[in-house]
Amino acid sequence: QPEKLFVFARMETSPAGIWRHLRRCLALALLRAGVDGVRTMDRLLAVRRSGLEMLAHRDLSIVLENLLAGRHVRDSAAWLRGEGLPDEVLHSLGLSAPGPDDDPEATSRHVVKAICELIRPGVVVFCMDQIEAVMSSPGDREGPHAFGRTVSCLVDETGNAAVISCEQSSFVNLMEQILDEAAKSRVLGRRATIRPLSWDQARLLICAR
């Protein structure tokens, strides 16, 4: 839909890399072209070019301006996805090189939040599938905690992000035991069960695919 962005993220990542994973998924959603050949970012951000100058994140502003203008597309797209670039490439683009104290995870969090803010009043929907994949082992508690913190940040610190999380029913019980009340209200606040398909529904699904 116009002014809406749907970001699909299969949560096959570590607890320490959730924001970098979401940044990549968000970048891929923006760079994806529709059947008409128009990229999602052109549809969402072309009318907001004036807002790029107001972005607090200077490097993000430069990268989005390049992509919208069709300049340095390959390297700018790589930066947006969070991929490392050689210092000489960063210098040629006018981007700052990461310092030894810079945290890639914190940088990715700022990028994700800044893009969400730029898309307002449009809505950014993050569909996080298989969230149990953030667990490194069956007894891991850091994975659910990290996921809860991420969802809470998206809900609390942006005015236009919505999160749909899909997980196995057994994982819901684990989340109820591990998360604090604030995180539970955001992660598990609204629930729906996906029931088995009927024969007619299955037939329609197969035909559609």
Image (cartoon, rainbow, N blue to C red):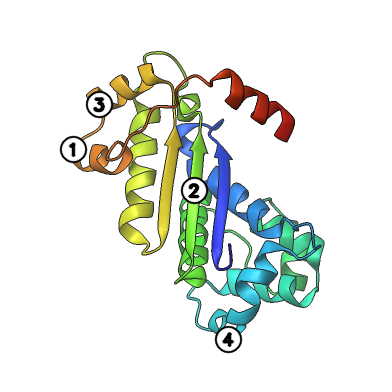
Q: Residue 117 at what x, y percent from top left? A: 45, 69
What is the distance, in whole Å, between disc 1 and disc 2 at their CAs?
Answer: 22 Å
What is the distance, in whole Å, between disc 3 and disc 2 at their CAs?
Answer: 21 Å
- Image quadrant where residue 15 sits: top left
Q: Nearer the viewer, mark 1 or mark 2?
A: 2
- Looking at the image, is 5 positioned above or below residue 132? below
Task: Identify the residue at horizontal 54%, vertical 62% (top origin).
Answer: 4
Q: Residue 90 at what x, y percent from top left? A: 72, 65
Q: Identify the mark nearer the N-term, 4 or 1.
A: 4
Q: Are marks 4 and 3 in contact (CB under 8 Å)?
A: no
Q: Which structural element holds mark 2?
A: strand
As drawn, the label of residue 181 is 1
What is the distance, in whole Å, between disc 2 and disc 4 at their CAs?
Answer: 26 Å
Is residue 71 visible to us here? yes
Type of amino acid under label 1: Glu
Q: Identify the mark nearer the N-term, 3 or 2.
A: 2
Type of amino acid under label 4: Ser
Pick out the residue farthest to the top: 138
Q: Which residue is mark 2?
A: 126
What is the distance, in whole Å, between disc 3 and disc 1 at their CAs?
Answer: 9 Å
Q: Which structural element holds mark 4?
A: helix
Q: Residue 98 at what x, y percent from top left? A: 59, 59
Q: Is residue 39 left or right of residue 194?
A: right
Q: Which residue is mark 4?
A: 50
Q: Which residue is mark 3?
A: 176
Q: Which structural element holds mark 3?
A: helix
Type of amino acid under label 3: Glu
Q: Is residue 25 left or right of residue 133?
A: right
